[in-house]
């Protein structure tokens, strides 16, 4: 069903059963059953003519209820947007989702060459600055439980491939005052992340962009992030070293 929603989001107009089946490479019988069930429950309707379907407003109502039950505070959204405006780079708030960091709010850079991310984007918790800023908020026991499940795939030449390397990076980040990455998961992408304490869930603030523009600016980016967090009473740490 997620594939179906994403299909309609891309398409932006109603589709027939045949079009859905062809686009998603679904068997016609399965498409008929899925679309029929969703239409019966009110999640799809026929806005123009019989046999052409589109998602109904019920999806929005249900997702809004889910979001309202565990909302991301407006202060966090404002924080992301503020840092995004100051740095000019893609900025996000991340939380833990299994072995990944998932972005809950994103302010995308307006540069033509930028890090493309959106709400729901996931990055490996061990191979990203956003992820390690979350790992740093776990106890050693909690981290070890996660480490046992991680498959240390080599995404790039700089991907951390061992528990020892991750723990070393966490120690360096504590000394430095922020977490950083250099092409560990996505080639030519540099990131800076910080913990966001005092929330009802573990969150990290991350700024990322192309290495050509962002790698050498990581200390400056960290100072901007720290000032934004500090102005909202969201950090107890000292400002990052120059």
Image (cartoon, rainbow, N blue to C red):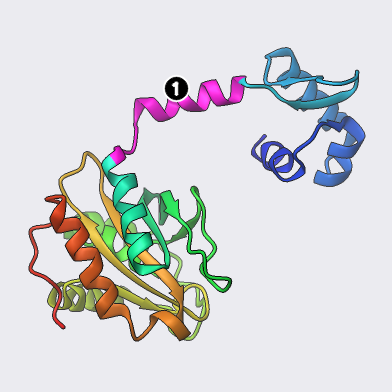
The answer, for residue 148, to whether it is visible in the render is no
Query: Which residue lies at the image location 68% right of the left edge and 14% below the top edge?
Result: 41
Task: Give the labeled residue for mark 1.
Answer: 65
Residue 212 image point, x, y percent: 47, 85
Count of numbered tags: 1
Left or right of 193 on screen, residue 173: left
* Foreground of the two, 54 or 141: 54
Q: Main secondary structure of the magenta part?
A: helix
- In this view, 186 is above or below 215: above
Query: Which residue lies at the image location 48% right of the left edge and 86% below the top edge?
Result: 157
- Quadrant in which the N terminus appears: top right
- Magenta stretch: includes residue 213: no
The answer, for residue 37, to whether it is visible in the render is yes
Left or right of 198 on screen, residue 163: right
Query: Which residue lies at the image location 13% right of the left edge and 80% below the top edge?
Result: 241
Query: Which residue lies at the image location 26% right of the left edge and 77% below the top edge?
Result: 220
- Asked which quadrant contains residue 218, the reply is bottom left
| Magenta region | 58-74
Residue 76 image point, x, y percent: 29, 46
Left or right of 27 on screen, residue 168: left
- Quadrant in which the C terminus appears: bottom left
* Foreground of the two, 174 or 217: 217
- In this view, 42 is above or below 17: above
- Where disc 1 sits, the SS reads helix
Residue 189 image point, x, y percent: 47, 76
Residue 62 image point, x, y percent: 52, 22
The crowding category of the residue bearing disc 1, from other C-alpha atoms within 10 Å (few below 14, some 14 to 19, many at least 20), is few
* Foreground of the two, 212 or 190: 212
């Amino acid at each position: 069903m997620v594939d179906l929603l994403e299909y309609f989001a891309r398409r932006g107009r109603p589709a027939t059963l045949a079009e859905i089946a062809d686009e998603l490479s679904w068997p016609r019988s399965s498409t008929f059953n899925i679309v029929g069930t969703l239409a019966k429950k009110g999640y799809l309707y026929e806005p123009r003519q019989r046999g052409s379907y589109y998602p109904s407003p019920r999806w929005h109502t249900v997702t809004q209820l889910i979001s309202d039950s565990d909302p991301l505070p407006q202060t966090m959204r404002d924080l992301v947007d503020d840092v995004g405006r100051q740095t000019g780079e893609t900025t996000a708030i991340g939380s833990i989702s299994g072995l990944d960091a998932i972005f809950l709010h994103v302010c995308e850079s307006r540069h033509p060459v930028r890090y493309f991310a959106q709400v729901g984007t996931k990055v490996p918790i061990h191979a990203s600055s956003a992820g390690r800023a979350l790992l740093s908020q776990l106890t050693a026991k909690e981290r070890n439980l996660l480490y046992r499940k991680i498959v240390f795939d080599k995404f790039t030449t700089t991907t951390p491939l061992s528990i020892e390397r991750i723990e070393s990076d966490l120690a360096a980040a504590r000394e430095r005052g922020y977490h950083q990455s250099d092409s560990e998961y996505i080639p030519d992408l540099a990131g800076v992340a910080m913990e966001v304490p005092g929330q009802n869930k573990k969150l990290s603030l991350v700024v990322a962009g192309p290495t050509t523009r962002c790698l050498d600016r990581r200390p400056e980016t960290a100072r901007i992030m720290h000032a934004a967090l500090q102005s909202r009473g969201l950090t107890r740490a000292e400002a990052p070293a120059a």
